[in-house]
Amino acid sequence: MIRTTCPYCGVGCGLQVAADGSITGDPDHPANFGRLCAKGAALAETLAIGDRLMFPEIGGRRAGWDEALDLVAARFRATAAEHGPDAIAFYVSGQFLTEDYYVANKLAKGFIGTGNIDTNSRLCMASSVMGHIRAFGEDIVPGCYEDIELADLAILVGSNAAWCHPVLYQRLAAARAAHGTRIVVIDPRRTASCEIADLHLALRPGGDVALFAGLLVYLADHAALDAAWIKDRTTGFAAALATARQTAPTIAATAALLDIPAADLARFYDWFATTERTLTLYSQGVNQSSAGTDKVNAIINCHLATGRIGRPGMGPLSLTGQPNAMGGREVGGLATQLAAHMSFARPADRERVARFWGAPALAARPGLPAVALFDAVRDGQVKALWVLGTNPAASMPRANRVRAALAGCPFVVVSDCWPSDTSRFAHVVLPAAGWGEKDGTVTNSERRISRQRAFRPAPGEARPDWWMLAEVARRLGWANAFSYRSAADIFREHAALSAFENDGARRFDIGALAELSDAEYDALAPVQWPVPRATSPPAPSLRLLGGAQGFPTADGRANFVPTPLRWPVEPPLAASRPLLLNTGRVRDQWHTMTRTGRVPRLLLHRGEPLFEMHPDDAEALGLHDGGLARVESRHGAAVMRIRFVADQRRGSVFAPMHWSDAFSSAGPIDALVGGATDPVSGQPELKATPVRVTAVETRWRGFLLRRRATPLAGAFYWARVPVAEGHAYDLAGWTPLSESLSDAWVGALLDAPRQAELIAFADPGRGAFRYARLVDGRLDACLFLAAEDAFLPDRRGLAAMLDAAVEGAARSQLLAGLPAGSLAGDDPGPIVCACFAVGLKTLQRAIANDRLTTLAELGRALRAGTNCGSCRPELGEILARHRVEASPHAREPAN
């Protein structure tokens, strides 16, 4: 049994990998105690090699490592010589292990001398970093997960934890069930997390600063401040309160500003004021904003004002989105930081890092954050770019602008595990070892360092990212500084730097781990920092900034920060773009789906990028539930399928961020998102893009099944999901089918070899066209097209026939849509529980037939909701709907 850590979100769940390759939760890991979400439970299914990158490539041809790395080093050397070090840039990833991050940062800032190394974590938690630094003097998360069980009031702000941090959500739900923890959700959307909420404040998008400013005023006016704490431990309270009074002078004014009931707002303020153990958990709804840092500080101000910080069950707790966003912060992965929580703003820090590394030309100033970095690539200031472990061509705001930047850059290197939207722009592609194939550490949202351990060999010639970076450094003449033999070597240096000339002014200190032997590093148990050399082993759950501890500021006091209200867009919205687009995650997918998009059952819950609207907004625009619409912003447009959501706030719309060109014709939703950023953190606004939505009339629809996955070309809508032996595509078009239908078009869709046999059926009168290609008598692909109102068979039974022999009468049955063993009589319906593939129709039949009334009964009967629990809110809604429909009053005629 090998213990390792999950590669998904910032919860940092421990895993156990058995000799047979099965993966389960680690019952001894303090982050999850054995729990897993649907994505974590499906990790073993992501390990097939498939289309992995396995060999270096130069210009699309296979190359050896020496040739590829020699070329990278030569182009970097020439670029620096001609244009200076800032013409070289790196864009790295929260998927990195800390050891990868450390080497990349050391090479870029310390030896090449460019500050231009930033990370996709800029899109995730940069506002939290700056909020912590402004308030505490250092990027410190004061609390820990144990506080979830100890809090009496838990506030989720901009966090759909039920889908995005499911394991922590289940811990919160269990705490509520055990001792009545009161839960408030603050979010413009009614999400799955609201299922256990005692109060949901559906505030106007971008109103978080006003809400917490109003809370600060309420605390001051209702004698709920900790005056002694404010006097002895903080500075700047008067200025912060004065600014808050300007924004939110009364409950009535604040409620009107936020468009929520004043009674609900007063209830929340009263609960906060009278509940000592109050925990505020916040995530991307706070961070991903052009006012994200002020939102973070508005939250922290309220905890400082009540002295509720660094003690059990209370404080602000930032939930990070990526597995090692925190590890990147430790090593200075952001362009605006130095390693080990040191700062460009302090000359002594810069000199200290340079001495420790023996760096010849440490970067003199911060580099460009992500949005500005890709603008610099586009404008020609950056001429050599290395992208490692991330997919900015799909995930960055103004994605089309980023693609133009990549296309025009003189030299692009991409290191990744799989081909991506970004790797197709690369001059050099390097195959990276992935999760389960390399060793290192990650740090989760509660500052807990855990080991990721290799349990399988990397395919082909794939190598760890740190190894590639070190090899380039050696070729540039810095072999002695990058003479690492293993990840353990790097970790020891990282730990030593954290303790170097650290007199306690920097709380990030893991010096006690700097002397670990290789064996001790391999056996390292999860541990929270700080772990300085002079201390005894840390407590199981360690809090910071409470009790008699001072703050790592010049005067040892925490800072209140005035937070004036700045809306994400100036009201009123332009008449041409009257709706606000909010982007975010769905339950079973991860980032741009390079891993989760390969697992069929993870696409059963959401198989396409549904565009969510309130029915009143949609119907006013002539849209239909399940129909197509064109969504346009100033930056791009996409055709998407509409989903009516009654709980969606009017005036706002939602789209998932995961789908890219590889999975849908809609492409990345971030092509529509603008480039506005927070002026303090540089984090982009991903929650409030003005858009126009117009109806697209569907003229035909269909589905395509085939063995190989490639994007489809043409003016029609498609979305792809993997199936057992291939891929299934849903299709819809807005021009008459007769204008598209041709042998060439059908052949391109079927994508079968030339020697394939084509069988076809056409009924133009009814608008029905069906095709299948057989290779050596086996089904390689089939295509079913129909006019909008014509019949289409169930694709699931046909999908089961991919790569199966099709002989005799089976050919006509195939085109009739009646394959042997059709599953139509046992249709599970849309999947609700991804862990056990339990569908809506299966649930409805069991509830009705077996008279099930509770989640526990559903779990015993079908196992639904008994693993990760992230489907439990939907299961509860299904039970509630059945109770209403089964009620005698529901069937009584109206008077």
Image (cartoon, rainbow, N blue to C red):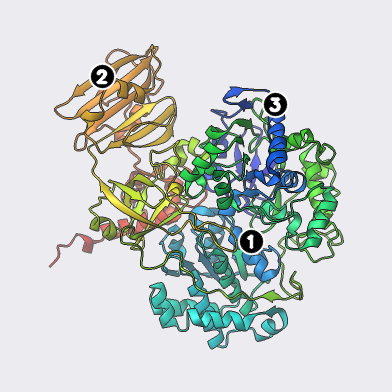
- Front-most of residues 188 and 79: 79
Q: Residues within 10 Å of mark 1 (few under 14, many from 20)?
A: many
Q: Which residue is mark 1?
A: 129
Q: What numbered label is drawn on residue 65?
A: 3
The percent position of residue 420, horizontal first and vertical second, equals 53, 35
Image quadrant for the C terminus?
bottom left
Residue 527, picture quadrant? bottom right
Side of 776 relative to 239 (left or right): left
Image quadrant for the N terminus?
top right
- The amino acid pointed to by label 2 is Ala
In this view, the mark in front (2 or 1):
1
Q: Which residue is mark 2?
A: 760
Residue 486, picture quadrant? top right
In primary-sequence order, the first of circles 1 and 3 is: 3
SS label for mark 1: helix
SS label for mark 3: helix
- Front-most of residues 626 and 521: 626
- The amino acid pointed to by label 1 is Val
The percent position of residue 774, horizontal first and vertical second, equals 36, 16
